[in-house]
Image (cartoon, helix red, strand yellow):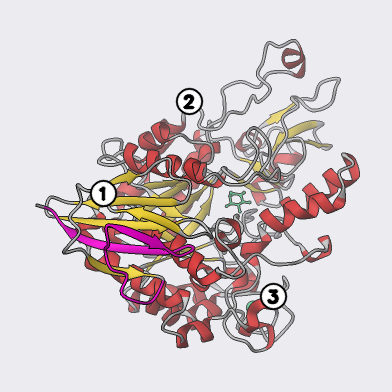
Amino acid sequence: MKKDWWKDSVVYQVYPRSFQDSNGDGIGDLQGIISRLDYIKQLGADVIWICPIYPSPNVDYGYDVTDHKTVMESYGTMEDFHELLEEVHRRGLKLVMDFVLNHTSTEHAWFKEAELDKTSKYRNFYFWRPGTKHGPPTDLQSDYGQSVWQYEEHTGEYYLHMNAVKQADLNWENEDVRQAVYEMMRFWLDKGVDGLRIDQLHLISKKEYLPSYEDYVQGKAESKPFQPNGRRIHDYLTEMTEEVFSQYDVMSVGEAGTVTPEEGLTYTGTDEHELNMIFHFQHMELDQQPGKEHWDLKPLELSDLKSVLTKWQKKLENKGWNTLFWCNHDQPRIVSRFGDEGKYRKESAKMLASVLYLMKGTPYIYQGEELGMTNAPFTRIEDYKDIQTVNMYHKRVYEKGYDPKEVMTSILAKSRDHARTPMQWNDGKHAGFTDGTPWLKVNPNYTSINAAEALADPDSILSYYKKLISLRKQYADLMKGSYDLLLPDDPQLFVYIRQTDTRQLLVINNFSDKEAIFQWPDELEREMAQLLLSNYDGGREALPSIELKPFESRVYLLKRD
Ligand code: GLC
Ligand code: CA
């Protein structure tokens, strides 16, 4: 079999809790996913990435794992899992599991033993440090709005948690930890799973020492002693490749916050024996104030977006491989974020798809994105379930004295729950997601935005995604060709060329809600240009000067001389 099938694939991401409930308990489950596989297949996706399905106390909805080798009861049984895998394969699709290996739940058997007994072999599976007279060993804060250190009274020491308090970081310096993790990875790959998405890969190697609070206040230590992408990350990845990935024909993709394109290349370069792809987040950080949290909003500058995406395209061009994504279970909905969820919802959602998914790399489409699902309009904090959102609200409102209205504005823009509201299947009760009470409220716009409506409409966002995906397949050679940005400083247009020796694809996008003019560049063949895709009706002729409607997108095929 071709080893790099993942380069020609389109991935569809499923958040199991919110995809389809099959038994009326209001929680999505494996049987629910099985019942919707034909939907994923008709979209044209090749691979399904499913967020964690392991047992979890759900502090972070599955990213706090208590047992990596079974299935969470509310999602089903191992039998259901085997059925899912078989049904996926029967349709010619592939299944990628989400694997959380930077931390475990504090309810994991390893941690339970470690916290009680300093002499247990599991003690050193985690990071423990004595406190200082100021309290925690260092002052580092997590994205969850708390110290990364939690005092544990049985042994009088603190453990490290880079995420929520109940997600204790595993100590990758300890070889027993690494071997235990590799064994769990093989457990799923041996079942025939087609790949793994590695959660928080950038955190597994920490800086080698933990400065004391005193060092820090005296300026002898950096404020963030736990730097991501630490010095041993590449040793671990090389070892992981040898022990796990090299033994299977599978794909690997790592979540790598805070990496630059240069570092990205070292994670995915073909000569490095590391991962196939990583998720970087540089394009997701452009609508936040520099150096602050993602809640601190700032409008997107189109030139920043062009520059970031282009740097990744160019840096990885012939050596690595990019992921292409706008959405996932941690991000707000892209049409609300960079498009227009009102008047131009359809046009902008289609344009956003064209801009990104015709670049070089593997597209990752997140459930509901293909319907143009929007952010939820919930204005009461009680309607949010995401721990990051809820902790931040309490911290800012009750500890820091922010105006609750301002905090809600940030939540309406950025909460992770916008991605997690139930999938909108139809205009029936609870959008067809469940017969019971959904665990998270359904976005009330399901009456008009839903899969049934989109499937019946040849002009829907869904139909456009299908055309775009089949275009990628039809022009697979061009999808491997080079990428070059045109008009880097234009404040409205996002235009680029993909090319091989014989052909060019010209992708023209008006990334604004105003009309825009595109002047056809002299050096590009025009008279024979063939329109392959557009989000507006009509002739859309390749004129020397093209007037583009708001959010208009056109894709032309050109011959090279
Ligand atoms: C990743 C996941 C996110 C989770 C975090 C901690 O970033 O995508 O949902 O909260 O890791 O596991
Ligand atoms: Ca269920």
In-front residue for pair 141/289: 289
Tags 1 and 2 touching, CB below 8 Å: no
Q: Is residue 44 magenta?
A: no
Q: Is residue 550 magenta?
A: yes
Q: Nearer the viewer, mark 2 or mark 3?
A: 3
Q: Is residue 261 above or below residue 108?
A: above
Magenta part of the chain:
536-560
Residue 1 image offset from top left, x and y in percent: 20, 61
Q: Amino acid at mark 2?
A: Arg
Tell whether circle 1 marks a residue whose Cβ is less than 8 angstroms from ligand 1.
no
Measure the alpha-carbon separation of dots 1 and 2: 46 Å
Q: Residue at x 69, y 42 (%)?
A: 143
Q: Secondary structure at mark 1?
A: loop
Neighbor class of circle 1 (other Cα within 10 Å; few <14, some 14-19, many 20+) is few
Q: Which mark is residue 231?
A: 2
Q: Which mark is residue 442?
A: 3
Q: Amino acid at mark 3?
A: Val
Q: Earlier in the sequence, mark 2 or mark 3?
A: 2
Q: Which mark is residue 521?
A: 1
Tags 2 and 3 touching, CB below 8 Å: no
